[in-house]
Amino acid sequence: MAQLRYLDEHNALHTRALGPEKFLIGRVESCEVILNDDLVSREHARLDRDPDGRFRIRDLGSRNKTFVNGEMISETLLNHGDMVRIGNRVFEFLDDSFNESPADLSFFTPDRGDPAGTQWIKIKMPVSLAVERIGGLAAIAADVPYPARAEDVASAALARLMLLVRAERGLVALRADKKKELRIVAQRGLRKDPGANVTPVSQTFVYSALLQSVAGRYPQENGQIQGDAGFAAAGMVAPLMHENQVIGVVYVDRPKTAQAFTDATLHEMTAAGAVIGSLMADATRRLSDAVKSISAPWVATLRRMQRALAVPVEGNKTYDIAMRVISGAARCGDFCDVIHVSDTRTYVLMVDAGGQGVLGLAQATGVRTAVGSALAVQPEGVDLPKLITAINQICATRHARQLVTCLIACIDATDGRVTYINAGGPPPLLMAGAGRLITLDQPALLLGIDPQFGYEETVADLPSKFRLLFHSDGVDGTCNASGEALGHQRVHDLLLNQTGFPPALELVNQVMQACERHRGERPQEDDALVLAVGHG
């Protein structure tokens, strides 16, 4: 069900359901949402439902325009989590038929100094908050049913914080493997439609909070706003705190605005960093406790379905192949198929629909069936971009669509190359010799995000002797007791330090043992799947 959420002038939360009828926002009483704001036109904007079930927002010729994720629009389709600004009011669009779009650090611009007019405060300084604002922060994650993942808590808390401070974009990110790197776990407004121009985020500003343990805002006054700075016109950032340690950052901004954040909102932001960090840590603890004690009849049912749908993988006289899976106690849905179309040409298909229930398993099975059928009909060779693009169009245009991670690779020993498309999964790793490890990058969008997206294949040369390692995100996401993820870099280093070419099964076992050592006593929450292909 689609909804629009916003805070009124008294900071009371309102949620309005959206249906097939037109939904008007403006100043006159005939509007569904009435805003007493001089910057709002009589009939400012309208939301309509398209035939495919998605919602579209249109600006109705207003004087001060309508903004989605900080960008001025005349009309646009809305995605789950989009932030809409009309006048001085910010709305959050929610649609549980669709998933939140992923974000990465490509929005960061490599600037070399703080934005003009930046104000920094140390996190150990006292903050001053009005009583009603304290109430707003106290309810920042009130919508989350426990037990919940830390990522879900971060997403809900970020959305409420943005409504509270009237921000249009934002992210929550944790420290990654290297202490100076970030991993985004929640975002609002930081998605990029194909061909769209999106205002960047100041990298220096965000990382200052992480590395110097400070909270900040820029600019301090409206007159200091620079429209051509190369990043958002106004922003705030604060460290995520847990047990007096900086574990990440929370960032919000207004990409195109004439209104700077106030000193009072900076104090709120500083407090929010401590609240969100503690809530995420508490969610991790609760989920871990729940996983330990859960009888999990529903997860057990999904697990039985997953096992019934899985197909054993086997090598042949050309390729040594091995696979192992550590089952997730809270989420499941990883599949891997190995399809030999000849003695020297083999396809590897990895599909991850984890955490999306029966619908995710069904959609993953549909993807696997489509690929298997195409290879059965055309064993001499399939046009991978055409195939994956067609599958994506089907996934993205279904009413109850689910995002699916998919990687397909064609390994051809005769031609000496691997051809692949990676729709959102961790990059495969190619061992080409002792100390020679190649990361097969070139990731693309997950299936189901954009029906118009055109997928392209990437080709890499294979030496006469090699090992190829494929793994699901559950491997990189394996967490220890403190919530630190194993991360891609540790898997990379494990393979880089190999002195020879171990058999496929030995290589798989080494990766799985690394997961188990890192995890310790903490249960594996998501499926961790590893497949190795060896030749020579």
Image: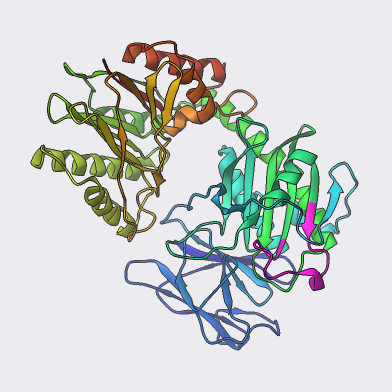
Residue 217 lies in the magenta-colored region: yes
In the rendered image, the quadrant that contains the N terminus is bottom left
Rendered residue at 11%/37% (across/down)? 379
Q: Position of residue 281 (x, y in %)?
A: 66, 34
Can residue 44 be seen at all in this image of the molecule?
Answer: yes
Q: Which residues are magenta?
A: 216-234
Nearer-the-camera pick, 194 or 143: 194
Can residue 143 be seen at all in this image of the molecule?
Answer: no
Rendered residue at 72%/62% (across/down)? 165
Nearer-the-camera pick, 164 or 170: 170
Q: Position of residue 404 (x, y in %)?
A: 36, 45
Q: Choose top left, top right, bottom left or bottom right for residue 460.
A: top left
Nearer-the-camera pick, 6 or 415: 415
In this rendering, the answer to whether 191 lies above or below 23 is: above
Q: Choose top left, top right, bottom left or bottom right for residue 347.
A: top left
Nearer-the-camera pick, 41 or 320: 320
Q: How is the image coloured?
A: rainbow
- Residue 299 lies left or right of residue 166; in this view the side is left
- Most common SS among magenta residues: loop
Task: State how many labels appear.
Answer: 0
